[in-house]
Every structure is written in C-alpha cells, then in structure tokens.
Image (tube, rainbow, N blue to C red):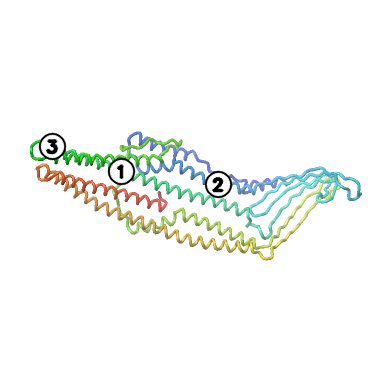
Amino acid sequence: MVASLFVVWAHHPSAASDGTKILSSSAIAQNTVSGQEARAIILGRGKLTLDVYLHAVEMNFPGLASAHDQQRIASANRLEKQGVFDPLFTDESGYTRMQNTSRIGEAKYVLFNYPKLEIPFQSGIRAFAQYRYNPNSAMSPYIETGEGGEYSTGIFVPLLRGLFYNEQTFALKEAKLGEQLALQTFTLTRLDTLLRAGGTYWNWVGTNQKTQVSKQILDLANLVVNISKQQEGNGDLARIYVTEAEEDVERRDADLSQAQRDFQRNSFRLSAVLFDSGGIPLPLPSEVNVPDEMPRPQPYSDPETEHNVLIALAKRPELKALDVQKKVAKMQLQLAKNQLLPVMNGVFTEGYDTGLNGIHNTYRGQVTISQPLYMRTARGKVQAARLRIDKLDRDREAEAQRIRNEVYDAISAINLAYKRFLALERQVGKAEQVYQGERERFKVGDSTVFLIAERERQLIEARIRMIDAEVEYHNGVLALRAITAEL
C-alpha cells in the first residue's frame, strides 16, 4: 500500500527535475571563444568587425549577465511554487493520562501513534496513507483500534470548487509563465544593450574616418605653406600670405586634435562593454583595429519594408510579453469562475484494523458542503479578469501599431540617409575637383591662400557630412535589426 503511493510519487509533477538551467560546456566554450577572438584581433592589430564586437558584448558583458540572473530568479520562484506539491509526512504520537468516562474519578492512560504520508496533486486531489495505533481509549479525538493498529489509505477530492482550478495550481502555472516573461524582459534588455553598443561602434568607426580626413587636410595645408614659401622666395608672393597659410595649418592641427579626442572618447565607450569570459576587460581598441571603410549603403524596397514589418510583429518581445500576460489573465478568469461553485469536498478512506479486538476491514466516506450566499468576491474577480483581458487586447493592438510605425520610420530614415549619402558622395567628388583646380591655380600665382583655405573648408565639410550620413545609415540599419528582434 505504501509502496503503491511511492510509485504514484515517482510520476508526481513535483518529483521532476527542478528545471534549473545550467550553462552547458558548449555555451561556456562559446563565451570563451568570443572573448578570445576579440582580444586576439585587438592585440594582433586586426580589424574589429561589428559582428565580432557584438558577439563579445552579448556573451561576456556583465550587464547582460545580471539580466540572466533575473531569469534564474524566475526559475527559482517556479521551484518555490512547486514546493506546495511536495509529499508531506506528519506524525502525532503521545502518551496521555485522562479521565476515565466509564468510571468517573479514575484515571485512564492512553498510548497513541498517528503517522501519515500525504501526496498533493495539481488537480486539487490529495492521496494519503496512514497508520493509527490507539488500543486503549475511544475518547475523541482518539478513535480506538485493535492491538495491532489500523493501516489505511484514502483520498481527498474537491468535487466542485478547487478541482483542477485552485490557487496552488494557479500560482505554479503563473510562475512558469513568469519564466517566459523573464525571457522576454531579458530579450528586450539584450536588444537595447546591443543597439547601444552597435551605435557606439559606428560612431567609433565614423570618428576614426573623420580623424583620417583631418590628417589629409592638414597635409594639404602644409603643402600650401611649402608652396607659399617657395613663391615668397621667388618674390611672387607677399609674406602676409605665407602667414595666412601657416594660420590655416594651425587651425587644421586644432581640428585634428579635436577629431583625435572624439575618437579616443568613442574608443573608451567601445571598450566599456568589452570583456572576456572571466569578466576581465579587454584591451582598449586603437585606430589600427578600425575597419578601413564602412559597407556601402543600400536602399530598402517596399517589399522588404513589409517583410520587416511581419518579422517585427512576430518576434518583438513586447508583444510576446503581452501574450504571456493574457494567458495569466485567462487563468485568473478560469480560477474566478471556479470559485463561483460551492465548496464540496469528499474524503474516502479504506483500511484494515489488526491485532486483538481488531475489526479487520474499515472504511469511511464523507462529504462537506459550504457556499457563500452572495458570491461577491468571486463575481468581482471574474469581472476584473475579463476587464484585464480586454485591456491586454487593446494594449497589444496599440503596441503592434507602434512597432509597425517604428519599422516604417527606421526604413524611412535608412533610405533618406542613403539618398543623402549619394548626394554628399557626388558633392565630395566635385569639391575635390574644385580644390585640386584651385591649388593648381595657386601654384601659378592665379589664386590666393584665402581661396585655397575656403576650398579646403568646403572639402572638409563635404567629407565630414558624408561620413555622418554613412554613420546615420548604419545606425538606422542597426535600429531596424533591433526593432525586428534580429540583432
């Protein structure tokens, strides 16, 4: 009999694994490889690509590790809720001196022993096995048994309220859905972290290209100074024009210092989220680690736009979180409806009374009923659950529309940045032609240092704006990948 209960327990839900997620050796190896790859590239003076950088951030950034801890907390909470379905062993044993009701004024001594094993199930049913030993007295609450005691098994069944829909089962299912909510929260944190990290990466690449432009312009300004000095030595140019050319060199040198400072600032920001698998910060990336150029921008077509809308609506964690919350609300509604039913519980036991004076087969059947007259508590819960479901439906519609518009806005920004890039690319080509022509005129004394400096300024502005357009484009693509949860 007791053995059969242990067979039941072996198939009991709470006897299963607690579900704690342990990081596999392959995942640990992947983390290690991602950190080592980024470290090898930086130390080996290689080019740090966006994919390698984001992979290292995703695998090893402590901020994301703490977000993982929230998932583990949700799993621990689910394990706690499973505990209510753990088998329970109780025992009541004692020795009592009491009034002898058959002979008032005389004492009677009672020895009793009531061990009991109870197994609760998610359906609300509880099975139990117990042993009662009380051969000396039938006084309540001590029911007399034979000299060998009584062995029995039984079952407690909620016939209406609490059958399949009860607070303990609801709490466990809610905790399991809480794990799904924690996953969506982590996904949102991950996307936000990678989006910010990716934006830092493209700003890092952009500021390095601006630094290279500033160096090129400084070299051109120094070349103009050398030409000016030659012309001064030949008596073809006044000293004031040489001074003006030297002043332009100092201005370009200051611009270069500012560009280098911008690059250093973005390098520190880039490094702030770079760690290896042991939590040790990776070396600071330098300009040699920056890719030589950014991928050339490409436009998005209308079919691609609609495809990205469908992907975003299918994968965004906000929508999945609302779907999980709706499942919880539906469970609350089921529980509230069940609480409208009367409380009707049945207890059924069957046993065998052994030893001297034992009566052998024993059994008991009992049904208890209770019912509040107004049911206002349950009716209020039903109304609240239905209203919450309606609210979640409306929230999901609004969130879906917001995500849809975010996709449209991101692709609009991408395509406009692409058009701006093309226009600025053409402008840079024209500005270079104008500058080269002005410099040739200056060599033969047909131009001035002021015009050369003006052509330099126009060329710098065009190149800087083109770099800004490229960075804006790639940040837009990064934002689109985050919106569609494909980052």
Q: Residue at x 46, y 49 (%)?
A: 187
Locate residue 67 relative to residue 101 in the image: left or right. Answer: left
Which residue was labeled with disc 2?
75
Mark 1–mark 3 distance (CA, rounded to whole Å): 33 Å
Which residue was labeled with disc 3?
229
The three-letter code of the residue at mark 3 reads Lys
Which residue was labeled with disc 1?
207
Q: Residue at x 46, y 44 (%)?
A: 64
Mark 1 vs mark 3: which is more N-terminal?
Answer: 1
Mark 2–mark 1 distance (CA, rounded to whole Å): 44 Å
Q: Report the residue that reaches farthest toward the front.
A: 240
Locate residue 48 relative to residue 329 in the image: left or right. Answer: left
Q: Is residue 168 above or below residue 287?
A: below
Q: Report the residue that reaches farthest toward the top.
A: 43
Mark 3 vs mark 2: which is more N-terminal?
Answer: 2
Q: Is residue 413 above or below residue 451?
A: below
Locate residue 426 relative to residue 322 in the image: left or right. Answer: left
